[in-house]
């Protein structure tokens, strides 16, 4: 067990730490202390990907962003020494900023916010059931589909908060997420693993699953080369069908977003089938399975096949607004490939600023965006509850201005324009190609 540089413990150099970056030999640095996670990595609740991407590096900002302070005590048995001190004034400023936000209470949750949120979810689902089951008019029943879509939209935003442990704490939040999100037909374990990875390697072409959408979308021309995905663990082939879709991706963006939720169903089934869940696997599968009971049962109450199809499409199209909100946060921003995060907090901080986009909106639209409009702040400090992000934004902007860094923020409509324009510009590269590239 190590306590500090004055306790006669081993001092490691940054270069030495950097050599231990394999799953079987994995060291990380957190607040100046070196931890050997080699034998413990498979037990990490957040999955292996975050550890692999930070192996041999300073993971201080990432650790503090994703874990409550009490977790530090659990690391003590894994400490093998300290790292030789180096002058990193910018990193110190970042840690001072984080401490300021902690001291001012921005990491604390207002329970009443989520109590009223629960009331809103119950109201939306009640309206859905009332209109769907007891209305005689087909049009009123289809209005129920709109409320179901809104229920899913708002419910998944709550699931996002829960999977970031920003409501009650890790154990209770994850339990609720496994129950609630799974009842929506989405595996919370799959989402959490994918999303944690996204936060660490945001917009990294070969690593970030949130921008790996072949055969439907390409946000970087590197995907034309059929590259290897470290997340999917396979080559993402850019074939004839991909070429056809990408040529028209700017036009197809919104239609595909209307049914994008179906892709999440598929990903969830695949993930659950692999058995990669280590915590309450049976419970999550049971909750997940219930979705395929209650949702078909609800649709079967409708009078005709045509009404059923319309109900399915409308509910998923409304819920698809969330997928648009996710895409506008990162699609139009710079991507990168074959670049590893440097061994300090400054590089991570800058990467989040460059690859994330805030959406400006009045306070009364916060319910609609669900905290995703403060994407920069969320990526820098993912543990801050969403109801505090509006208060945190001016502090982050001021800090960026002092450091000479750019903070990106545009309106919702401008963000949508940027996404469509970016997809169009990338598609033009394939516009007269005559087919997929030859490998």
Image (cartoon, helix red, strand yellow):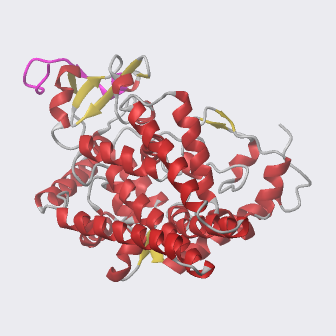
Q: Nearer the viewer, residue 151 or 251?
A: 151
Q: Is residue 379 magenta?
A: no
**Which residue lies at the image location 69% right of the left edge and 65% below the top edge?**
309
Quarter of the view holding residue 418: bottom right
Image position, residue 401 (x, y; %): 32, 70
> In the image, is 85 to the left or to the right of 8?
right
In the image: residue 295, left or right of residue 20: right
Residue located 20% across and 57% down the image: 107
Q: Which residues are magenta?
A: 1-17
Above or below for 414 versus 260: below
Residue 79 in view, yes or no: no
Q: Picture coordinates of residue 437 (x, y %)?
A: 84, 45
Q: Is residue 21 above or below residue 190?
A: above
Q: Note whether 388 is above or below 34 in the view shown.
A: below
Query: Residue 314 location, x and y as percent?
Result: 61, 70
Image coordinates of residue 341 in percent, x first then y, are 44, 41
Depth check: 344 or 197 in front? 197
Q: Is residue 16 magenta?
A: yes
- Whether residue 356 is situated above or below residue 336 in the rendered picture: below
Label the magenta part by its dominant secondary structure. loop
Seen from the viewer's position, the closer of residues 302 and 214 is 302
**Image quarter of residue 432:** bottom right
Image quarter where the N terminus lies is top left
Residue at 84% x, 62% y is 431
Across the whole image, how many numbered discs are drawn on residues?
0
Q: Can you say which quadrant of the picture contains the C terminus?
A: top right
Residue 188 visible in the shown view: yes
Q: Residue furthest right?
A: 434
Of residues 355 and 76, the one nearer the viewer is 76
């Amino acid at each position: 067990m190590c306590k500090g540089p004055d306790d006669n413990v081993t001092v490691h150099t940054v270069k030495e730490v950097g050599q231990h970056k394999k799953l079987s030999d994995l060291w990380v640095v957190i607040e100046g202390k070196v931890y050997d996670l080699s034998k413990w990595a498979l037990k990490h609740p957040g999955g292996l990907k975050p550890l692999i991407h930070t192996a041999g590096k300073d993971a201080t900002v990432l650790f503090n962003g994703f874990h409550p302070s009490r977790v530090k005590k659990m690391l003590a048995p894994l400490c093998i020494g300290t790292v030789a001190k180096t002058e990193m004034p910018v990193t110190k400023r970042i840690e001072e900023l984080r401490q300021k936000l902690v001291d001012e209470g921005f990491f604390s949750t207002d329970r009443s916010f989520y109590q009223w949120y629960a009331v809103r979810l119950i109201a939306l689902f009640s309206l859905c059931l009332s209109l769907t089951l007891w209305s005689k008019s087909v049009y009123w029943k289809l209005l129920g589909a709109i409320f179901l879509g809104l229920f899913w939209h708002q419910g998944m935003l709550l699931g996002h908060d829960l999977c970031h442990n920003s409501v009650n704490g890790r154990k209770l939040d994850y339990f609720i997420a496994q129950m609630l999100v799974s009842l929506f037909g989405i595996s919370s374990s799959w989402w959490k693993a994918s999303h944690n990875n996204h936060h660490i390697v945001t917009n990294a072409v070969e690593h970030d699953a949130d921008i790996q959408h072949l055969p439907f979308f390409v946000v970087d021309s590197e995907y034309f080369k059929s590259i290897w995905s470290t997340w999917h663990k396979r080559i993402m082939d850019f074939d004839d069908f991909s070429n056809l879709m990408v040529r028209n991706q700017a036009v197809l963006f919104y239609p595909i977003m209307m049914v994008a939720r179906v892709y999440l169903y598929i990903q969830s089934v695949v993930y659950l089938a692999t058995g990669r869940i280590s915590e309450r696997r049976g419970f999550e599968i049971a909750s997940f399975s219930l979705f395929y009971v209650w949702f078909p049962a609800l649709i079967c109450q409708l009078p005709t096949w045509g009404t059923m199809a319309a109900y399915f499409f409308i509910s998923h199209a409304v819920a698809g607004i969330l997928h648009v909100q996710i895409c506008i946060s990162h699609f139009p921003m710079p991507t990168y490939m074959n670049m590893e995060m440097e061994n300090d907090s400054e590089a991570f901080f800058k990467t989040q600023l460059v690859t994330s986009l805030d959406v400006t909106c009045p306070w009364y639209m916060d319910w609609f965006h669900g905290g995703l409009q403060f994407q920069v702040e969320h990526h820098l400090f993912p543990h801050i509850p969403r109801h505090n992000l509006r208060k945190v934004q001016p502090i982050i902007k001021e800090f960026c201005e002092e450091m000479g860094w750019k903070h990106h923020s545009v309106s919702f409509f401008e963000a949508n324009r940027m996404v469509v324009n970016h997809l169009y510009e990338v598609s033009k590269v394939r516009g007269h190609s005559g087919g997929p590239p030859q490998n």
